[in-house]
Image: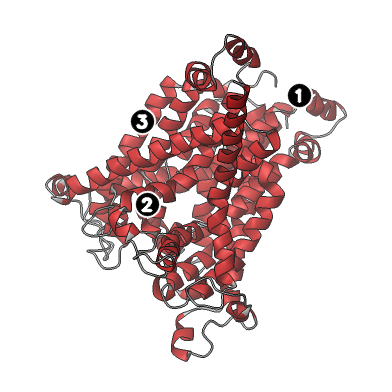
Amino acid sequence: MVGMLKIGKILLYAAAVVLALLPVVPVALLFLLAFSEHPVFIEGFTLKNFEFLKTGVLFPEHPVYSKLYPNVYTVMVNTFLLALGNMLLVVLVASMAAYVISRYSFKGRSALLGAFLVIHGVPASVLLIALYYMLRTMGLLNTLAGVILVKMSVDLPLGVWVLKGFYDGIPWDTEIAALVDGTSRFGAFFRVMLPLVSPGLFAVGLFSFLSGWGEYVFVYTFIQSSTNWTFSLLIQSLFGEMGGINLALVAALSIVYLIPVLVIFLVGEKYLVRVTIGGVKG
Amino acid sequence: MSREASKKILMLAMLLPAVAVIILFLAVPAALTLLISLTELDYRFQWIWCGLENYARLFSSPVLQLIVKATAIYVAGTLAFNTLMGLAIALISTHVHDALGMFVRAVWLLPRVLPSVIWALLMMWIFSPLEHGFLNSLIVRAGGSPVPWTFLYYWPFLFIVNGFIGSSLSGIIFSSAIKSIPQDYIIAAKLDGASGFTIVRRIILPMIKWHIAFFVAYNTLSLLASFEYIMLTLNGGPGFYSTEVMILHAYHLAFGQYMVAMDFGYAATIVTILLVVGLALSVIYWRVFRLRRLMIEPKLE
């Protein structure tokens, strides 16, 4: 009996280790490939796949190829602008709306919250056709600003829900004390409440930064000219055309794309879990 | 200005941006999709009303059967993968040492936070049918012949690609549900001599059944309209529409490069149907899971 229990325990731990390895192995393989000497197989160790970092030009020795792709640093700036714009807008708009929803009862409050919940359950992909038409009418097609606006409105409902939870967790006494001291309502919000929900702002901020940084469908659909590309478009395009020829280069580029994601993941994993519980991706 | 009025103005000012964004970029597009489905809108961007012609065209299209079948297989298969893998993650990670359990759940978040393009690329490379695909390179090195993974096993491939994203959510939901089960029940069962398997089947699973039901409901809704990872990997292939789910077909009709692209009116028909199904499901879930509880009015003002 005791022996059986022990075997059971060993099997359980073995299963846990295998389970932990499953998602890590593909990422580890990507690193090995990026430093590989062979263009398509994992072999040896070299830094030559990262040479594009010097000037940002891909395939400098093939003028025909290199003209097809934008400078890596342009792409990096675009990706960063999309992520940053999405993060700032979501945090700004959601932090105000969530405060009002958490603190005040007003007509249409539950309808609004319900709308946030329902919208967030239905993926935004269903709206692409109409959004394309609208952006075209507004002259925002093929601009990063258009993509940022669409992206932030899709991430907003989740941000409001998560932040509402954080505001709900702060006792009323804190705010009433500030109001009694003569602070205005806005002052109470800005100087008392916002600092208290900073973990929530941090969580929503990290999430929306990552969400903008990794976005593919909106950029692919709304952006045509390669000077407005983000990393996701560059890598997808390179993988389609060079996947069988120079996979190691695509892997090296992916590593550059991945580094901020991994840093944010390591720093903010426990914050991201709070947001994931209401996550959108299938 | 009275206190009450200034409070109202402040509330409105703080709420307005969010409401404006939701209306302009989510409510208006939803209504617009329905309207577009009643037109012949195409690359010329002219509104030509055509009534229900697009719907008639869709229902008589020989492709309809294929895309509905693909959607059903995709949703059912991915859902099964997500639920079972989520249960495995939750059961295993709550029964090992806490630190290891937390590590397992954290690591499973990784595919979810990776940019979709990178996850798709990794899966395409690992399961590539060519000789330089990672699995095939191992097989060839061992003396075997390469296996055309994505040609033979395209559905299991897509279940894996999508399932690694979805299982982190189910894993987290189920784990916290399991952790909230009072330990007394499990200790009592152990004293009665119940085996680990019996405890899982008779105590844990019945006690988290509502969490499982909620995940299945929620995930069905998001899978019905998700196509990003299919588009990034097999893109409807291999062969004729074998993995072309409804929403991907709509995307191809509207934005695809080599098919009859920019057929916005017709594409919107499929999307409208999905929207209606999605809204109907949302309303049902709303009732079943009593989500109104989440909307309790604030106690004090």
Circle 2 residue: B157
- Quadrant occupied by the C terminus of chain B: top right
Circle 3 residue: B281
Q: Chain of mark 2?
A: B
Q: Is residue B155 left or right of residue A272?
A: left
Looking at the rendered structure, the kind of residue marked 1 is: Trp
Q: Is residue B103 left or right of residue A71?
A: right
Location of residue A104 in the rendering, given as x and y in whole percent from the top left corner: 65, 26
Circle 1 residue: A172
| In front of the other: B38 or A43 | A43
Mark 1 or 2: the one toward you? 2
Q: Is residue A91 left or right of residue B243?
A: right
Q: Is the residue at mark 3 from the same chain as the one at mark 1?
A: no
Mark 2 or 3: the one toward you? 2
Tag 2, which secondary structure?
A: helix
Give the residue drawn at x 54%, y 50%.
Answer: A23
B75 relative to B300, above or below: below
Q: Chain of mark 1?
A: A
- Mark 1 to mark 2 CA distance (whole Å): 51 Å
Give the residue drawn at x 47%, y 20%.
Answer: B201
